[in-house]
Amino acid sequence: MSADDVVSGILDLDSFVGWDAVPIDVSPDEDYRVELVAAAEKSGVDESVRTGEGRIRGRRVAVVAGEFTFLAGSIGVAAAERIVSAIERATAEELPLLASPTSGGTRMQEGTLAFLQMVKIAAAVHTHKAAHLPYLVYLRNPTMGGVFASWGSLGHITIAEPGALIGFLGPRVYQALYDEPFPDGVQTAENLYRNGVIDGVVPLRFLRSIMHRALVVLSGERAIGRRQPDLIAAAVDAGAPAWDSVLASRRVGRPGIRQLLRHGTERVPLSGTGQGDADRSVLLALSRLRGIPCVLFGHDRDRAGGEQTMGPAALREARRSMRLAEEMQIPLVLVIDTVGASLTKEAEERGLAPEIARCIVDLVTLNTPTVSVLLGQGSGGGALALLPADRVIAAQHGWLAPLPPEGASAIVYRDVEHAPALADRQGTRSFDLQRNGIVDTVVPEFPDAADEPVEFAQRMVSAIAHELQAIVDVPTDRLRAQRLSRYRELGLR
């Protein structure tokens, strides 16, 4: 796939305008000069990258695309300078940037100087992202070495071409160094997706639509659609015992985060941490809820009937959602619906408790609007890690406790028979949480969400949008101060 293929496959027809100047002179020796001339004749381009701008459905974007036919897409000083100049121009002109590398890595003919160019490219990408501008990456076949280890791995969203060879050390180099073949199936786009390194594997023909949806959300633009019906009056506490809510929250058929996402628009699913972690008990996506853009993250009860616990990778993915929302200055919506954090040897050894602590700190100090939704079960540290937001909404039968009531009963009474009574004593119900200042709004269920999944999901999405609308224009420093004050005073009044 050539750079021209990428440009024509993603951008609006005839919208591309090149930015490339004549490559800088790297003072090549005679052999290298001959190689450069031959590469230009073979590829029809003057370097291993092309840069410029175009439009995706009318939306202006900057593009940096690798060209593998020019010396295997390798990056030397001239190519790196072209990339950095394009990134800096995109930043100065406040343009989102689409990068599509394909490369064998660093250009060996230029040695260590070429190797060090990855530092300035990575720094330029960081500056672009620090300006709250989208950086979207499409990895093509192949993307290897220092290219993958710098600008190929820094995207807010990273998608790859199906079947693409992607990795750090090339298989030919590995075999030469270790006299054995590299294991099959490791350095593939599909394997990296399964392991949480990239967000998806998508053919070029679908990329234009995905990138457009992502840019709509990441730009922070709000849509004005048809007016939603007014929110139903807050749920009324009828004095039902907490155990009723516990049982309702565990019912098969109760709507979860996926049902909420179906009522959003411009949906773009993401996956994993980008650092080799993936936990299928959670879901991460971009969306607009009632026209308001957001990063949506939460427990996914559909994955295992609501019984799958969350491990350290899920919490690291939660922290990714927080960073993404803060970098792009769009709201974060967190959905709580979990039986609790994983109680396994692996979870302990991979830092479950420290990740809970980091999640809490990241969330309570985040510089972007936040809404947490207690959708169902809210058990233990896995729930608490997603709770401390600017606004907290609870489903009528949502509940929050340090442990499942059975676990608390085992600690206090050395049996599980006291679980219903202990759930009441601990103040776990949504109405108790509201009375204690933990929850702001309780969304009613008629009689519980499993009996009216579509209506309930619509009602909850309207409630989320209502709360987002109230805070989305509040200065982030004020939101953060109010959030810290709220949790500082909790339980003292």
Image (spheres, helix red, strand yellow):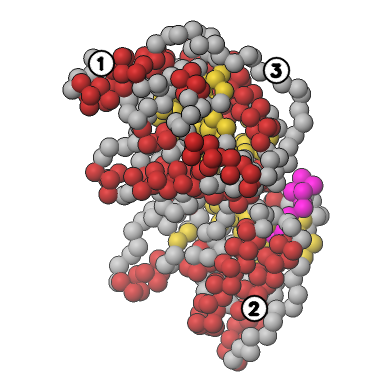
Q: Main secondary structure of the magenta part?
A: strand
Numbered disc in front, either 1 or 2: 1
- Contact flag, marks 3 and 2 (Cβ < 8 Å): no
Q: Horizontally, is 257 left or right of 121 in the view? A: left
Residue depicted at 36% across the width and 48% down the height: 354
The numbered mark at residue 230 is 3
Specify few, some or many for label 1: CA neighbours under 10 Å numbering under 14, 14-19, or 20 or more: some
Residue 372 spot, x, y in % from top left = 53, 33
Q: Which residue is mark 2?
A: 78
Q: Position of residue 134 (x, y in %)?
A: 65, 53
Q: From the viewer's perspective, is 84 left or right of 404?
A: right
Position of 264 with respect to 486 (left or right) is right
Marks 3 and 1 sit apart, C-alpha to C-alpha, by 41 Å
Query: Image quarter for residue 419?
Result: top left
Q: Is residue 112 above or below residue 304?
A: below
Could you tell me which quadrant the N terminus lies in? bottom right
Q: Is residue 122 magenta?
A: no
Q: In terms of sequence position, does the residue under pointer 3 or pointer 2 come before the other? A: 2
Q: Is residue 57 magenta?
A: yes
